[in-house]
Image: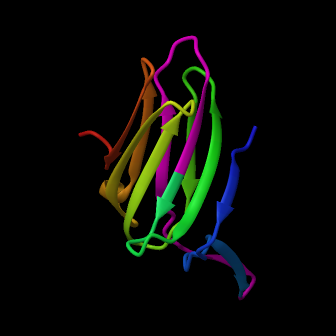
Amino acid sequence: MAPQQTMRSPSARTDATATPQDDSMTDRLALNSEDLHVRSYEHQMAHDLDVGVYAPDGETVFEAQYRLEAGAVKSEINTLPPGVYEIRASLDDARETRRRCRIGDAPDRTAVIEVGNGVVSVTERFPR
């Protein structure tokens, strides 16, 4: 099931396209960015996760509700323009965490939201 989402800020990024040119297809490359990476380390339990992304002025720029089954992974691609945001995650309406993260086109500019053992965490970048 796809997450329920509200997006209030348009992204300036585009998807890769192919255009005909002289009887050949030329690919215009566009950079895709994984802005949010959500994953569950649970082995048996499913969880409800609410995620909010907020601009420095407090404006909500993205919200999503996920039903994370055990071992599930979700991604938000090209959802946010590059910048610094506060990421808030609430697990089963009981545990909440927040962190400021830089979102952008590089892997170290991805907000990683992880669920496991009844705990939710938000980190900036994938572990090395």
**Left or right side of 26 for 103:** left
Using the rendered view, name the quadrant where residue 69 is placed: top right
**Left or right side of 64 for 54:** left
| Residue farthest along the front direction in this orientation | 94
Answer whether residue 114 is magenta in the image. no
Picture layout, residue 25 above or below residue 54 = below
Picture layout, residue 9 above or below residue 51 = below
Q: Report the coloring of the rendering.
A: rainbow
Answer whether residue 26 is magenta in the image. yes
Query: Residue 93's spot in the image, x, y percent?
Result: 56, 34
Q: Is residue 79 visible in this depiction of the protein?
A: no
Residue at 52%, 54% in the rendered image: 52
Q: What are the residue bounds of the magenta stretch? A: 22-51
How many numbered marks have been drawn onto this rendered protein structure? 0
Q: Could you tell me which quadrant the N terminus lies in?
A: top right
Query: Residue 39's spot in the image, x, y percent?
Result: 49, 34
Residue at 44%, 70% in the rendered image: 58
Query: Residue 68's spot in the image, x, y percent?
Result: 61, 30
Q: Could you tell me which quadrant the C terminus lies in?
A: top left
Q: Is residue 55 visible in this depiction of the protein?
A: yes
Which residue is more in the foreground, 107 or 88? Answer: 88
Query: Residue 9's spot in the image, x, y percent?
Result: 58, 74
Which residue is more in the foreground, 47 or 80? Answer: 47
Residue at 41%, 72% in the rendered image: 82
| Residue farthest along the top direction in this orientation | 44
Residue at 50%, 71% in the rendered image: 59
**Left or right side of 8 for 29:** left
| Residue farthest along the bottom direction in this orientation | 22
